[in-house]
Image: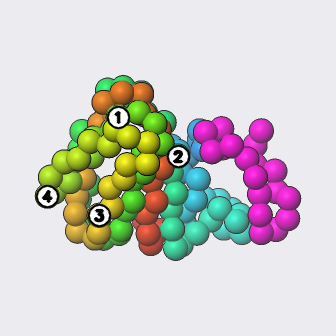
């Protein structure tokens, strides 16, 4: 399907298809070219498709952004500096602020949306 550009400031597509080459990231400072409407220094959005057992074994280190993790389907555990939470019901979410590190594991086939701000390298 690709990313049909309908006008200079809007496009449409399919998140799963359009993010295959960007590790699931749909919006952020890393989207090229910089004049693409998906390029943003303000926010990052990820469509995460994770098979059961998929995990991030390493922890983030001193991330200074705010993050929202929203469960679309499946069962997904988020491990934070201050504890863990299993997201198991569609719509469950976790939200954490700057300075809280994290890792995660898909406990079943899962789809999650991650929103991070600001978008920074």
**Mark toward the start of the polypeptide (1 vs 2):** 2
* Separation of marks 2 and 3 at Cα, in angstroms: 18 Å
- Name the spot of residue 115 as percent of width and height, x first: 46, 59
Numbered disc 1: secondary structure: loop
**Mark toward the start of the polypeptide (2 vs 4):** 2
Q: Is residue 76 one of those drawn in magenta?
A: no
* Separation of marks 1 and 2 at Cα, in angstroms: 15 Å
- Name the spot of residue 102 as percent of width and height, x first: 25, 53
The label number, if any, that marks residue 75 in the structure image: 1
* Separation of marks 3 and 1 at Cα, in angstroms: 19 Å
Image vertical order of residue 96 relative to residue 51, above or below: below
Snapshot colouring: rainbow
**Mark toward the start of the polypeptide (2 vs 3):** 2
Identify the residue shown where x is 82% and y is 68%: 8
- Name the spot of residue 68 as percent of width and height, x first: 39, 59
Residue toward you, 90 or 17? 90
* Separation of marks 2 and 4 at Cα, in angstroms: 25 Å
**To which quarter of the image does residue 89 belong?**
top left
- Residue placed under numbered mark 4 in the picture: 82
């Amino acid at each position: 399907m690709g990313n049909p550009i309908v006008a200079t400031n809007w496009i449409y597509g399919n998140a799963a298809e359009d993010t295959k080459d960007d590790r699931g990231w749909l919006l952020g400072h890393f989207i090229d070219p910089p004049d693409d409407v998906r390029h943003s220094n303000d926010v990052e959005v990820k469509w995460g498709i994770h098979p059961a057992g998929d995990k991030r074994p390493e922890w983030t280190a001193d991330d200074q952004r705010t993050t929202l993790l929203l469960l679309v389907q499946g069962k997904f555990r988020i491990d934070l500096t201050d504890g863990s939470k299993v997201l198991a019901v569609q719509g469950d979410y976790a939200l954490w602020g700057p300075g809280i590190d994290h890792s995660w594991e898909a406990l079943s086939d899962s789809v999650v949306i991650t929103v991070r701000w600001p978008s920074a390298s």
